[in-house]
Amino acid sequence: MKKIKISFLFPLMSMILLIAALSQQLFSIPPMGKLLNPFSGAVRNGESKQKRNTIKLEEEGLKAAVNIYFDQRSVPHIYAKGSDDMYFAQGYITAQFRLWQMDFISDAAAGRLSEILGNRFLEYDRNQRRIGILSAAKASLKMIEKDSETLAALTAYTKGVNAYIKKLDYKNTPLEYKIMDYKPEEWSNLKTVLIMKNLTSTLTGYDDDLSMSGMMMALGEENFNKLYPSYFGPITPVMGEQKKVINPDLVFTKKPDYLNFGFMAAGTMVNPSTYNPKLGSNSWAVSGNKTKSGFPILCSDPHLNLSLPAIWMEMQLTCPGTNVYGVSIPGTPAVIIGFNEDIAWGITNGADDVKDWYKLKITNDYKKYEMDGKWKKLESSVVEIKRKNQPSFYDTIYRAPQGPVVYDKNFAGNQGGLKNSALKWELHRPSNEFSTFIKLNKAKRYSDYKNAIANFSSPIQNFTFACKDNTIAINHQGKLARREAAEGRFILDGTRSRLLQRGYIPVDSLPGLLNPSSNYVLSANQHPTGKDYPYYYSGYYSEIRANRIQQLLASHNDFDIKDMEAIQLDNVNKFSLDALPLLLNHVDLRSLNKEQLHKISTLHNWKGTYDFNDVNALLFEFWWKNIKEAAWEELKIFPFYTKAPDDYVLLNMIKNSPEGKYFYTPISGKRENITAIITGALIKAVTTYNGIKSTDNSKWGAYNKINVMHLSNIDAFSRMNISSSGHPEAVNAISKNWGPSWRMIVALGDRPKAYGIYPGGQSGNIGSPNYDDFLTDWTKGKYYELNFYMSQEEAQKNTNK
């Protein structure tokens, strides 16, 4: 995208603001005189294309000067004489590039949007306070303050951010502050912790306990396990091959004895969760036994919401004992995903269920709750929510032993069935994830890596590791609660103390793999174990990408960087490949006209590719969508139905039970055999496809549009309707508003060689040429060489050309 020319925007700014206000955007109209002032207003936020210069940072608070070199893509390479100064400089530069983004996210996480944007965000803020993100951040900060290394890093980072804030005047303040009419406030260590808690919330906030409780009661054990089994389709467990001994609790879910309609009588209507269970990632590592160079290669592409400013910021951090390159999260110190001279690491979401609801019995006055037949005092606290131009709102939050009561007599939210239920969420536990990344940044060997991740708590992540000594590993790391069978998959009975948490699975029993005989490890949000794992757990796992990655990694033994690029950009949906032969076999060709027969003939040769110019992908998508709608129409009668069974569940039913009870045509209302349903779904799909084809949008890329939205949802600051290849179940997992937020490939050796890209740009300033300058190349599948400098002299030489 070309640079947004701020000077051209503002003759029409009054109209833009009026339209925005009427469109329910995030802000109210600011003082127009200040905003349109040609000397200090929004027009001053434009940036030229002039190359950034080397900075010698000599701010108050530094022990020694820090040199910062910028390469051609405005990536800062920070060289300091000590770790405190390094993190100070990281905070300073991150604020210079991304101040509004990090400030806004921390405020949103804390439930403070009403304070800066007005009363319309009161319900949002109340929900944030009630689910406990702010209180959890405060508890974690107290824990962090006991760890001198982490506290020093956070404090130095905070000082760096504030050193930059102190230099700001209205003229140079980020545009979003001007539009929303508020000022940056002093940064704090708490804000940094809030950023990390916000990420934890994003990755672990999904739950379907209420919906699954209703479905278990409506379907009964046998049918529930057929439609919602813990394992479905082919699996590729994180920890590799499974043993022959099967844990029955992982295979068949029993209905808890207390779960009945009387127990759930307070409410059964369920709204879909606002969290996305598909947010995940790919990451894998291959040893030198499978590469041309003889050294390992590690690949990582975390799948998160696509947004502007970008989620990540690319940088190199160097001080004695540390020389690391990768991406950081604006607002937090250290590199989160990256590499140094010796190791590389990637991260994927563990996808475990760590969020539970306990249905309580509470007295009408909310003074007591029942536990084991006895009435006990219900704790409460009052929180102040400040509101812009209005008096503060005071909210009473009740707390049981399990956690906060989010929905009560005073706050209904959007989940009536969860009224008077307590939320137990691993996010609430004090934790120090920063320590893991600080240690990883300077790790040199496998033992350093294991020490770094040993105390990582939440969110549970799959850490993928490679070392230049040819060690590769993967670990499913975090606090995973010990549970009884089926515990946590349904609403829990809050009156029983035995259902309170009984501790965690021992760290040395968590799934992991070190130097397997296959010479590769991989994670793509699949099951961490097979059915033989001795501990019960549950989650929101997907096997399709993992199965495809395994297929590609097992295909040959001489990988190089280009091969790894091809895997990260692979657009094959393996489910489509598995489903297509079975579906084609069930089509009644006698019922098709000439055009429909032609479409079938083209699908016979389709390879399941969702490439930009593919003309079959869209037809298959329509076809499968129609089949699913017909199969699961009967489930929609249940008010608590929010999630269809997995696609492999349906595919297995087509294969093994073609006369199944759920197969009938919704139009006629008659029960049909699967051949009639599949054939009718195809005929309908061809009609829909022809309607799309008439608009020249039948190629997958023309139909498959993505939106990279500004955090404020202002369209003018976003990139919308971008044509793209990829599919949510392909390795190149691109959806409408989420996808690979950072693609990284690292070939280790005597000197690491790495490539990467993310959808955005280094700057958060919409008037900067670096605001979204990576985005077009990202959509085209291009990579940039990552300039990892082994010394300050090398950085100085290569950035001053």
Image (cartoon, grey):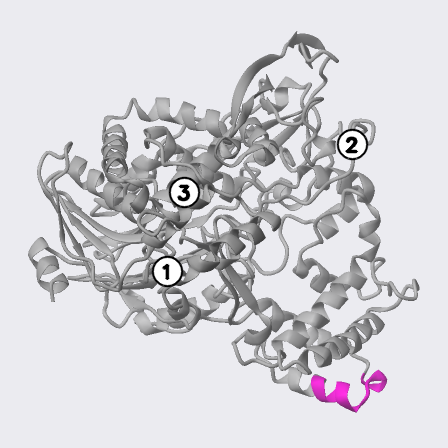
Residue 675, x across and y down, in percent: 82, 73
Label 1, secondary structure: give it.
helix
In this figure, which residue is indicated by the disc labeled 2? Answer: 267
One can see residue 768 in this view: yes
Name the kind of residue labelled 1 in the image.
Ser
Left or right, residue 354 beside residue 170: right
Name the kind of residue labelled 3 in the image.
Tyr
User: Residue 177: which numbered mark, if any?
Assistant: 3
Left or right, residue 333 beside residue 104: left
Q: For the magenta stretch, what is the residue range?
A: 589-599
Badge 3 or badge 1: first in the primary sequence? 1
* Mark 2 and mark 1: Cα distance apart in space: 55 Å
Badge 2 or badge 1: first in the primary sequence? 1
Whether residue 158 is situated above or below residue 753 in the rendered picture: above
In this figure, which residue is indicated by the disc labeled 1? Answer: 7
| 3 vs 1, front mark | 1
